[in-house]
Amino acid sequence: MSETIRLTVAQALVRFLSNQFSERDGVEYRLVTGIFGIFGHGNVAGVGQALLQDQVAAEAEADGSDVEHLPYLLARNEQGAVHAATAYARTRNRLQTMAVTTSIGPGATNMVTGAALASTNRIPVLLFPSDQFATRIPDPVLQQLEDPGTLDVSVNDAFRPVSRFFDRINRPEQLIPSLLNAMRVLTDPADTGAVTICLPQDVQAEAFDWPTALFRRRVWHIGRPAPERAALARAVEVIRSAQRPLVLPAWASEQLRAFATETGIPVADTHAGKGAINWDHPLAVGGLGSTGTSAANALAREADVVIGIGTRYSDFTTASHTIFADPHVRFVNVNTLGFDAAKHSATMLVADAREALTALTEALAGWGTDAAYQQRAAELDAEWQRVTDECYHRAQTPLPAQTEVFGALNELMGPEDVVINAAGSMPGDLQCLWRASTPVQYHVEYAYSCMGYEIPAALGAKLALGEDHEVVAIVGDGTYQMLPQEIATIVSEGLKVILVLLQNHGFASIGGLSESRGSQRFGTQYRMRNRASGRLDGDYVPFDLAANVASWGADVLRCSTIEDFRANYAKAVASDRTTALYIETDLMGPNPPGSAWWDVPVSQVSELTSTQTAYAEYTREKTAQRHYL
């Protein structure tokens, strides 16, 4: 008979996770490096007890034992914990991740938004929401949702559509295949995201005789699928036929620079791929799409072949299917996931980006675009760089534009430091203006664009990178009020990040969008209720953002001018404490000039002249929209 060990389900879970490793290119990594959590009645005596027991064992073995243990980090908000784990995994190139444990009910459902963000971005995170009793004896238990139509539904079923793998453990032995499949999905180079294993609170504490083989050291190998020979030949044939090709990478790769240099094909970028090629490379033309540069968008309109590397082709990237204007444009898509590789009727190359780019570079040896096309790309980019300089160095009148803050940061941060952002008008400004020289420097979450991501993401990125990198989260007043709690976690863990807090008393992005669509910025400013008009158009809400940040334990430096900001940034870098730089900016911008469209429907009928005008413009712009067939 095989050897067994008697443990609770939670104890077995912790022991198993401590012995899982990933491997790529011959280098091994610990797969799950820690677990965030908040304890409640659903997990305090199950997973909580198991983590305590593991920590006590770690302290007893502090004499140099090589036994792995699972560190616990106390989060302040469950959604924030998932964001932190996601940012950690992204920063570690999806080779490592962290787990999150929660109680049942609201503690569990608080994670749903975080799970959706992770899966949308294809980033592996491991979630353990507690669940109602499997025995159903204490029924309904506190925080249990009752469905009169079935007893087999809990709030945790909300995780199903936002998870790449979902399971519920109703008997101890079910944990064995569930954990093995969870590791499979976490280490899948294509189809990964949130992995959710629901743990009924009674099952967590239940003992079982586990085969000791379950806890052996396991290495999960993350491969680099090579391009299939015939598919490579088809892709090369399409590229060789191009006169005005354009590369669109969404993943970083050193091979991209070699590919661009060898072929002379200009390279635009998405949020996920900014820094894949250094901004000052002769063939780099900046961001593409609704928030892209005039250079990249001009080339996209003329492109006869678009080479997508790892991109999802979101509506911002394609300017809602209007930016690729050549009537005969064709696509060559490189992606590990066939679902993405097939988009826009593309010639598919289902392969790892590095392997595919290496193979394409070799197969295209001796072929390249003509000098006139490369010169045009360089001239278009040079013109945009002049625009960037103007946006970065506007005169403060009376408040600085947020683009001036970005310019100061771009000039002050090092190539291995990290800027983090996710929502509002900032990602658009950053995509078209930020000059990224390395892939690590640019961390903007724009697949789910989740307000509140920035501060917990700074926590995760700092845990992943350590003290040799400055991690800078840019946070607007709107996104700050969504999820500031993890500042306390950052402080309690003794970590140092820099927060850049922009106060403009409202939603700049949605305000501008509202105005452009005829809705007059309605409901987008932080104002007191005006008793005369009944609207929220009174005085500013007396909210002291800087004081609120300080209450979480961070140092705060108030900045009145860009000169103040630059000086205080130097102080923040010199400090060993988390520091926030607070500065008021102009809600009305100005923002960089736009050069592409975004499909946001306008009311077809309205009594408002502003809406009528916007609808007429909308119908004109929409005529350029089409499927790429």
Image (cartoon, rainbow, N blue to C red):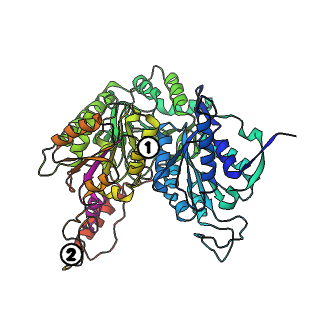
Q: Residue 605 vs residue 212: left or right?
A: left
Question: Considering the image in quadrants, where does the N terminus appear?
Answer: top right
Q: Give the range drawn in magenta.
A: 496-525
Q: Residue 219 carries which label?
A: none
- Residue with the mark numbered 2: 530
| Mark 1 vs 2, N-terminal side | 1
Residue shown at 16%/48% (left/top)? 560
| Image vertical order of residue 578 relative to residue 277, above or below | below
Q: Residue 175 vs residue 516: left or right?
A: right
Residue 203 visible in the displayed image: yes
- Residue with the mark numbered 1: 493
Q: Where is residue 541 in the image (x, y as percent from the top left)?
A: 23, 66
Q: Where is residue 231 in the image (x, y as percent from the top left)?
A: 59, 33
Mark 1 or 2: the one toward you: 1
Tell me, yes or no, whether the highlighted magenta stretch contains residue 564: no
Image quadrant in which you'd find residue 620: bottom left
Q: Residue 528 vs residue 39: left or right?
A: left
**Label 2 CA crowd tier, 10 Å (few <14, some 14–19, many 20+):** few
The local secondary structure at tag 1 comes to: loop
Query: Is 372 in front, or is 99?
Result: 99
Tell me how far mark 1 sits from mark 2, CA to CA. 43 Å
Tell me, yes or no, whether the highlighted magenta stretch contains residue 523: yes
Amino acid bearing label 2: Asn
Residue shown at 64%/42% (left/top)? 17
| Image vertical order of residue 63 relative to residue 479, above or below | above
Q: Residue 541 vs residue 105: left or right?
A: left
